[in-house]
Image: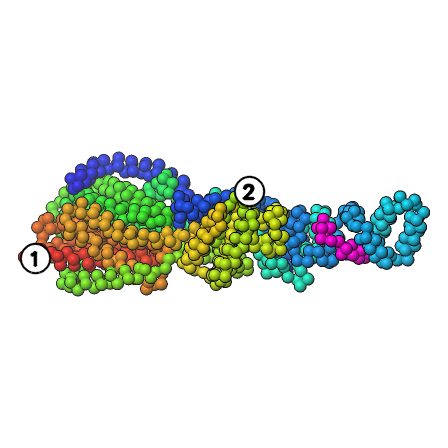
Amino acid sequence: MAKIFNVIGQFIHQHAVAVITVVLALTVAVGVGITKIQMTMGNDMFVSTKSKLYQDTQTYSNHFGGDSFVVLIKANNGTAVNTKTFQAVTKFEKNAKQITNVKGATSIVDVINQEMAGGDTSMRSGANSPELQKRLMAELSASDKKKLSADLQTILTSQQKQKLLTYATTNLNSEQKQQMATAQAQLSALPQAQQQSASAKMQSQLMTKLNATQQVKVQAYSMSLLNAGQTSKLSSELMGMLPSVQNMKTSTIHALLYSNDGKLPSAMKQLLPKNGKYILVSIPTTAKSSMNDYQSIYGSLKSTLKDSGLKTSAYSVSIGGNPAIQGSIAPVMMHTMGIMLGASVILMIVILLIVFPVRRRVLPLVVTLVGIVWTFGLMGWFGLKLSMATMATLPILMGLGTDFAVQFLNRYEEEFRQHPVSAEATQRATKYTGPAVATAVVVMIFSFLTMHLSKAPMMKGFGTTLAIGVAVCYVVELALVFAYLALVDRKSVKQSVTTRPFKPSRLSQVLRGYSRWVMKHALVLVIVGAVAGVAGFFFEGKLGIETDVQKMIPQDMPALVANKQIIKQVGSQTKLTYMVEAKDVRSQKVVNYLRSFGKDEQAKYGKGKIETISSLATTLDGMNADIGTQKALNHEVSTLPQAISNQFVTSDHQAASITVTLNKHLSSADGLKLMNNITKDAQKHPAGVRIAVAGGQAELLQGISNMTANHGLIIIAGLAIIFIVLLLVYRKVKDAIYPILPIAIVLGLSPLTLYALGISYNPVTVALSSLVLGIGTEFTILVLERYSEERRRGTDVPVAIENAIGSVGQAITVSGLTVMGGFSTLMFGGFPVLQSFGLITVLDTGYSLLMTLTIMPAVIYLFRKRK
């Protein structure tokens, strides 16, 4: 391998201009892919698109819609139940429904209008009260009142008509009574055959001559005479004549919604929180809406609210829901990445200027930026999405890329000081560092790819992105660093080594002294390190894991703040959904099962875990629906307001939904356990029925299991792969084991640190083991390579260790500090998930550097061949 890299070094030196030109030209071409990068905050981060849960969720979304935006409208000056607000909400909904990828919009206005259109008043308290009838009659036009009065006469029996006439007569004034007497005399003079039709006409004329007060009294009395069938028929006709609820008087709307004690019926409380101080509007999206679609819808909804007159001082409006959060996070992610990039550059410049005592010490950072362009460009070309995990790739590669370039530059400067001819220094530097760093990169790649053993797609994408990143950074930086150095040092004149005496840097001298101290206390240091590492693994199983996306993103995001406000006023929005499939979910067998299942689960787990369980059965029960026969049940389902029926049953009646509202204080881990228990209970269903958990919340909860699944296997596989790679490279078992031992200790210290700091695993920190294996092994490999080089020259073990730590130790110290600087910028972003990840990776990198400089030389010294 050394011969190959010697040829590579010679080629780069001879064609430096061409190499730089080709690399930069390709950088432009590859960089175009950055514009093709798509972001994701969807649940496909946590569950595979091939999983049963994901497929069921897609089916569920096709039936009942995707995630919903939730708009909460507060009336700042009292109740929101008034004509002006209802009209504004109607306009808002109408415009919202026109937005691309919006499936519909539902509010109290829709529910009432659909209910009236169907002639159904069963959901409203006091629907047939005299006061309500009076209000509703006042909303009718004169012609509608006349027609309704005439229609009333047609449905009354002869006995009812006689009672009504008697009652109306007793309420007449003296002038009306005189007119009535005259009409009666004329009626008596008619032949018997004509008297019946004339009597009906006379009664109708009498009703038209009543004043407003008399009409109200007679109307109320006539309603009291009606039987159930007559009442239903007349109510249906009345509802059909009424204007839309948003066009009614405020007093009528109040009478329509509130019972006599001023409280809303239970069926309306979710849509009118706080007894009508708020109005809730639900806006479901289409099943395949993406994060970009959510962003577009979110912006359109804000504009629509303004156009509808709801963004005034009279109202306070909050837009929440998972789509609102996802739709507003993309700009925040890009802003955060900009901050991290800027902070990385500044920190690394400072670190390189302070602790890297060579010429052109900022060069590693410059070529690393080129490697970053390649990495994210290839992400776009390969269709890799930017998630909360992959966005952490930026500072990680800033650190690792700078690390590679530091190794190249450090060795070149060392060779150039001893052999001040550019061609010779280039060839020797590539000959020795090229293979060493290449071995470390190969180990890194395999370490990162072990993330594919995870069941969470986000972790697989993270591992792939890091593997691509370190590979392209290595190739690009190897070419650019040595090509640039060849150009700037080509005119150097060869001088004898004696005229350029080499003086080790202060850092190198400190490291040499430290290596001597380590060898003196080698046994004690190895024992202490081993005990600490083993103790750390004990805490691995005690760490929790957080998959609540809302706790991982900036807490001051407007959409997140709005969502918390909605939860505070409306209650828990954490809804676990189940899809029920049958030949006809309206069958009494299915509906009875839905009722008993909901009651059993509610009783079994209590309010501490489940706030409510809603289904087609609970909706019908809440309406006191007549479902005694299958025919009656089918009729009741068909008359449900569409805004409500769409939530619980499909139009073909082959699928239904069960919604389990979880307690808002329930943790993600407890939520997962509850979901698994309910899913197990749901398998005791009737024959011909299928019940499956589905929906976004189920995917998030399943993500808890997927994130931690195979975590131990990933560590074992990583260690095994590293051992195999190193064994193939070095052909010696001990040389394959040496680099692993210090990092195994770090793998134990990492969970110990997490536990001590009270930090749970999250979708990013769970990848720490792969990162530690990749980054830490690079340090140990570089030390081992330099030690082996010194031994091949015939140097004794103690001196070889001292030379290796004094020379390459300086480079990996600088590299370690730059990597830590890159990771530390994660803490500058507003994402809590990245802040905790940044903190622990800085510490883990520090552990890796310390163990490399301590345990590695100690182990080599202890297991040396003794004379």
Q: Can residue 859 be seen in this view?
A: yes
Which one is in front, 233 or 634?
634
Indicate the secondary structure of the residue bearing disc 1.
loop
**Residue 655 percent across, percent down from the top left:** 52, 46
The residue located at (67%, 63%) in the rendering is 261
Which one is in front, 587 or 572?
587
Q: How crowded is mark 1: few (under 14 residues within 10 Å), some or many (20 or more)?
A: few
Disc 2 marks a residue whose amino acid type is: Asp
| Residue 33 inside the magenta-drawn segment | no
Which one is in front, 437 or 411?
437
Residue beneath label 1, please?
A: 866
Q: How crowded is mark 2: few (under 14 residues within 10 Å), some or many (20 or more)?
A: few
| Residue 229 inside the magenta-drawn segment | yes
**Residue 129 percent across, percent down from the top left:** 71, 58
Please give left or right for residue 162 compared with residue 77 in the image: right
The residue located at (26%, 46%) in the rendering is 446
Figure quadrant of residue 172: bottom right
Figure quadrant of residue 78: bottom right
> Of tags 1 and 2, which is closer to the observer?
2
Residue beneath label 2, please?
A: 652
Q: Can residue 251 be seen in this view?
A: no
> Magenta segment range?
212-233
The residue located at (90%, 55%) in the rendering is 177
